[in-house]
């Protein structure tokens, strides 16, 4: 689709009366574009060569979207970001693994060079609970901070967001379970993802588990949306092969699920499509060639797009089925998703309008021609997804992952009560979830 000044670019925002400042390097240097009428445009990926990435700095002048800075080495822009936000004392939320990679020291140096004092909270754990959030809040209070940075995967970003809720609005995490429960403004929040999967950097939701009940609480508020998201693909090179695979599959599932949920809409669809297309073209590449910066770049953007899609469309049955597997058997989120995703797509595609959406995704990703019958297009999509899952090397057999057949009924019951099950486009019962688990054994 022709974009500003005739560039062929791939989308980021759908709306009217939009002014966008493009201050990045390359062809978008210091341009301001105004769109008086409703447009859906995609940012900065050439349709014909999905791997040609152009660094950008996207400054929206409309609410509920972060400033996105994307490009190789763009972490250096953090110096300018904290200056422009007037940050003096910042809480840097991260995990011990990232301290070892050197990323934490590097980011802290950029902040110190910008005259910002840094309090580091490096005790983030996978699937964070209210306990970690409470510890994080305590560290923030000691540091008297006026901004928060989340550096890491989804867990670090979610912990940072959870901390921001309590620090800015008081109370406990449970008070913000649901949507729009924060009444006061929040502190500036800078998201710096080092994985390419959760899309937390472009969502206003923090997923925090209750430390006692282990129930995962989705706490969302537009005020919790990151102020700035810095997407530097160089930071994702330190992911292990397993993390690359798990997070990449997560992004792929986010694209597929957000495309079809009951809450899907014209604003969410372009993000789902853009993310799906990028995942299809690049997930296999980052697995086979982990040092491929262009592919890392693309997967990072795919994850961010999928996050924007989820923000507008939510998720579905694959996430509902995956969560109990993580809770009870410790199966990593992306691996649990990989186990159930093909069966969920097949289940949903028995509903004709949803089959058409899957077929449309296959067309948009150029997996099939436009005149291919819907059923055949869905078959190609499922086969492509299965092929990608296979090339990740993840073991997706639930039996081999330690899930006994005798537990499937009880897991299915729990899956049916998950929040995201309610957004699945085809009504789904516990018996349906049990059948999905059976197929994944
Ligand atoms: Fe996910």
Image (cartoon, rainbow, N blue to C red):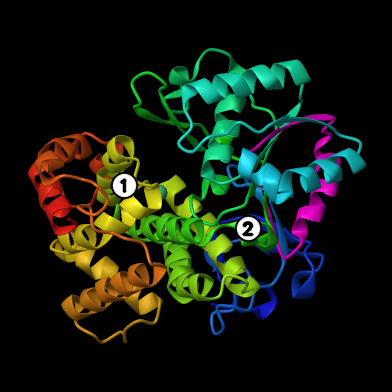
Question: CB at mark 1 closer than 8 A to ligand 1?
Answer: yes
> x%, y% of residue 323?
31, 41
Which residue is the extreme one toward the top? 171
Q: Is disc 2 surrounded by few (<14), some (14 to 19) or many (20+) residues within 10 Å?
A: some
Towards the viewer: 249 or 43: 249
Callout 1 crowding tier (Cα within 10 Å): few <14, some 14–19, many ≥20: many
Q: Is residue 330 left or right of residue 247?
A: left
What percent of the width, then of the height, locates residue 195? Answer: 56, 54
Q: Is mark 2 on a helix, strand or loop?
A: helix
* 81 magenta-colored: yes
Q: Is any atom of residue 183 visible in this view?
A: no
Q: Does the residue labelled 2 lie within 8 Å of ligand 1?
A: no
- Residue at x 28% of width, y 68% of height: 358
245 with respect to 441 (left or right): right
Residue at position x 76%, y 26% in the image: 146
Q: Name the residue under label 1.
A: 319
Measuring from the top left, give residue 277's x and y in whole percent. Answer: 45, 72
The residue lying at 39 percent from left, 53 percent from top is 334
Span shown in magenta: 68-94
Q: Quadrant of the C terminus?
A: bottom left
Whether residue 40 sits left or right of residue 145 in the image: it is: left
Residue 128 against residue 57 in the figure, above or below: above
| Residue 219 visible in rendering | yes
Q: For mark 2, what is the residue? A: 238
> In the rendered view, would you say 116 is above or below 333?
above
Question: What residue is drawn where x is 39% and y is 76%?
Answer: 364
* Nearer-N-terminus badge (2/1): 2
Count how many numbered circles sit on residues in the image.
Answer: 2
């Amino acid at each position: 689709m022709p974009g500003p000044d005739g560039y062929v670019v791939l989308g980021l925002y759908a709306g009217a009366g939009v002014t966008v400042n493009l201050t990045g390097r390359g062809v978008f240097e210091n341009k301001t574009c105004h769109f008086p009428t409703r447009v859906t445009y995609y940012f900065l990926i050439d349709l014909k060569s999905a791997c040609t990435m152009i660094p950008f700095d996207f400054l929206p002048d409309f609410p509920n979207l972060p400033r996105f800075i994307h490009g190789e080495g763009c972490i250096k822009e953090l110096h300018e970001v904290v200056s422009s936000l007037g940050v003096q004392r910042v809480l840097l939320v991260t995990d011990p693994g990232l301290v070892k990679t050197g990323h934490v020291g590097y980011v802290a140096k950029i902040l110190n060079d910008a005259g910002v004092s840094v309090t580091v909270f490096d005790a983030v754990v996978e699937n964070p609970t209210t306990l970690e959030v409470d510890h994080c809040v305590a560290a923030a209070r000691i540091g008297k901070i006026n901004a928060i940075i989340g550096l890491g995967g989804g867990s670090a970003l979610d912990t940072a967001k959870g901390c921001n809720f309590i620090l800015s609005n008081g109370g406990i995490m449970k008070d913000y379970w649901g949507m729009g429960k924060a009444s006061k403004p929040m502190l500036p929040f800078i998201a710096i993802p080092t994985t390419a999967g959760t899309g937390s950097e472009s969502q206003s939701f923090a997923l925090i588990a209750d430390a006692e009940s282990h129930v995962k609480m989705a706490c969302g508020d537009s005020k919790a949306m990151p102020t700035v998201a810095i997407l530097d693909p160089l930071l994702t090179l330190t992911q292990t092969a397993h993390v690359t695979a798990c997070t990449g599959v997560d992004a792929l599932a986010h694209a597929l699920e957000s495309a079809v949920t009951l809450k899907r809409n014209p604003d969410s669809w372009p993000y789902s499509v853009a993310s799906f297309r990028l995942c299809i073209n690049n997930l296999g590449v980052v697995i086979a060639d982990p040092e491929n910066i262009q592919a890392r770049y693309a997967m990072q953007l795919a994850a961010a797009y999928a996050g924007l899609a989820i923000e507008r469309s939510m998720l579905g049955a694959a996430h509902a089925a995956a969560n109990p597997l993580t809770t009870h058997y410790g199966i990593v989120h992306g691996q649990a998703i990989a186990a159930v995703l093909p069966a969920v797509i097949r289940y949903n595609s028995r509903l004709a309008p949803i089959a058409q959406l899957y077929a449309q995704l296959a067309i948009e990703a150029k997996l099939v021609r436009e005149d291919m019958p819907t059923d055949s297009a869905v078959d190609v999509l499922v086969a492509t997804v299965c092929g990608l899952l296979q090339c990740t090397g993840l073991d997706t057999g639930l039996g081999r992952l330690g899930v006994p057949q005798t537990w499937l009924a009880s897991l299915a019951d729990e899956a049916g009560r998950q929040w995201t099950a309610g957004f699945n486009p085809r009504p789904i019962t516990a018996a349906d979830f049990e059948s999905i688990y059976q197929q994944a054994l």
